[in-house]
Amino acid sequence: QVQLVESGGRLAQAGGSLKLSCAVSGSAFTITTMAMGWYRQAPGNQREFVAAFTSAGTITYGDSVKGRFTISRDNAKNTMYLQMNTLKPEDTAVYYCNAVLGPWNYWGKGTLVTVSS
């Protein structure tokens, strides 16, 4: 059973930066064998794609975060990160970590990011 635990969310000011972490445990597989990504959901909105690694290591970003957010991972720590710069109030959301391993799709419980103007 893969477990994902997000951390790093907090209140930040517009124009500031935050770094989120997603720690992966409970799997014999390393994160390099998984497709992993970040999604977010603002109140009243649908869950939105933010950034992801494919299982081949290709990186993709959602249009709303391109040039501001950077996804990365530390294979030795089995942890994925999301560096968020130039934050905007519209980045306010619960940020979720996602991992896909074969036919299984895993989600963390989320971490809240609030950006004040």
Image: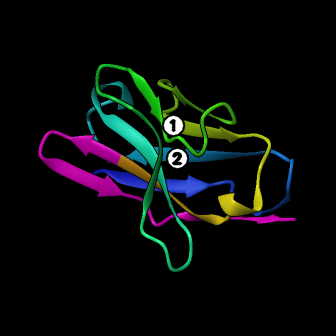
Name the image quarter holding the C terminus.
bottom right
| Any part of residue 112 in sight | no
Q: Is residue 52 above or below residue 76?
A: below
Asked if one can make out residue 76 in the rendered structure from this viewpoint, the answer is yes
Q: Which mark is residue 22?
A: 2
The amino acid sitting under disc 1 is Thr
The quarter holding residue 74 reads top right
Does residue 98 appear left or right of residue 101 in this picture? Answer: right
* The quadrant where residue 37 appears: top left
Residue that sits furthest to the bottom in the current view: 44
- The residues tagged by marks 2 and 1 sit, at their Cα atoms, a distance apart of 5 Å
51 relative to 110, above or below: above
- The residues colored magenta run 99-117
The percent position of residue 27, horizontal first and vertical second, equals 28, 42
Q: Main secondary structure of the magenta part?
A: strand
Q: Residue at x 39, y 46 (%)?
A: 25
Of helix, strand and loop, which one carries label 1? strand
Q: Residue at position x 52%, y 29% from top?
A: 73
Marked residue nearer the N-terminal end (2 or 1): 2
Q: Quadrant of residue 32?
A: top left
**Element on which disc 2 rests:** strand
Counting from the top left corner in percent of width and height, residue 71 is at 56, 33
Residue 79: numbered disc? 1
Name the foreground residue: 69 vs 108.
Answer: 69
Question: Label 2 neighbourhood size at 10 Å, few (<14), some (14-19), many (20+)?
Answer: many
Q: From the viewer's perspective, is 52 left or right of 86?
A: left
Residue depicted at 52% across the width and 37% down the height: 80
Q: Are marks 2 and 1 in contact (CB under 8 Å)?
A: yes
Instruction: Single out the residue that lies furthest toward the left.
Output: 103
Q: Please name the residue shown 44% across and 30% down the image.
A: 60
- The residue type indicated by label 2 comes to Cys
Residue 87 in the image: x percent, y percent? Answer: 77, 49
